[in-house]
Image (cartoon, rainbow, N blue to C red):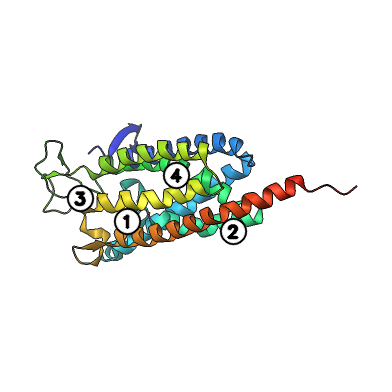
Amino acid sequence: MYPLLFKIGSIPIHTYGFLIALGFVMAMQVIKRLSLKSNLPVEKMLDLAFWNLIVGFTGARVLFVITRFDYFISDPLSIFKVWEGGLVFFGGPLAAIPFTIYFTKKHKISIWRAMDVLLPSLVAAHIFGRFGCLGAGCCYGRPTDVLWGIHLHSELVESSLRGLSLHPTQLYEAFSLMVLFVFLLRVFKVKKFDGQVGLTYFICYPIIRSIIEVYRGDLIRGFVIEDVLSTSQFISILVFLSALFILIYRLKSLPQLDANKKSNEFKPSKK
């Protein structure tokens, strides 16, 4: 745990905020490259990414505040201390998806093609975010006796768990996301239809998150079924099933789409 990275004069630069910013820069570079390959307007896609950062960050913070409502109601100003950590990731996409639909419709951009560009960039940013969580001391794991256990002393850690050997769930997720990022780029190269990359993300990430949740020790994330099904696992199930249903539907529709495309290619033009 290393919450304070360095100081510029008297200005503290927190590890969490620094890595979030670094992740955003990386995400923007991914968006540029994939937008060009997808024949999407780069500037509009970067605008969309910028506004999604604000909307998604706000959504993730609001959901975190909801999970620790008792704490924040007693100290409302702490809601704005985002540099100290404290985001619930699923709150980001839940807020950003409706905005993305609105933005793409307004600017006449394919929502499916935009998803294929945005989701790999989100994973890239998320990797840095999880390393930021490690620095801040949040999103920690259960007590463990494994050799790679870590010791955290952050105020974000339950008092009974401070100083104990805990599963480094932040690293588990960061490395899982690295694998997912590479996989999504591979899917992007061989995809058969627009939206395949985005839907693959919404199928794979819930699986990753649900497994990581088994090792999580921060009880503030909440449970739908106490000690059995966490809030994030419940959301993961809904997202996974929805994405899987849409993916199957689009795969079944693929032959018809290809037939229509070929029909239009060979249809003689009117002069």
Residue 123 seen in the current view = yes
Q: Nearer the viewer, residue 244 or 255?
A: 255
Q: Earlier in the sequence, mark 3 or mark 2?
A: 2
In this view, the mark in front (1 or 2): 2
Residue type (three-letter) at the residue carrying disc 4? Leu
Q: Earlier in the sequence, mark 2 or mark 4?
A: 2
Q: Nearer the viewer, residue 247 or 146?
A: 247
Q: CA distance from mark 4 to mark 1?
A: 26 Å
Q: CA distance from mark 1 to mark 2?
A: 31 Å
Q: Earlier in the sequence, mark 1 or mark 3?
A: 1
Can you give x and y, in whole percent of width and height, for residue 248 in the image? Answer: 47, 56
In this view, the mark in front (4 or 1): 4
Q: Residue at x 39, y 55 (%)?
A: 60
The residue sitting at the left extreme is: 145
In this view, the mark in front (3 or 2): 3
Please tell me the numbered disc located at residue 122. Answer: 4
Please tell me the numbered disc located at residue 215. Answer: 3
Element assignment for label 3: helix
Q: CA distance from mark 3 to mark 2?
A: 37 Å
Can you give x and y, in whole percent of width and height, for residue 50 in the image? Answer: 53, 46
Q: Is residue 89 left or right of residue 154?
A: right
Can you give x and y, in whole percent of width and height, for residue 234 in the image? Answer: 31, 62
Q: Which residue is mark 2?
A: 102
Residue type (three-letter) at the residue carrying disc 1? Ser
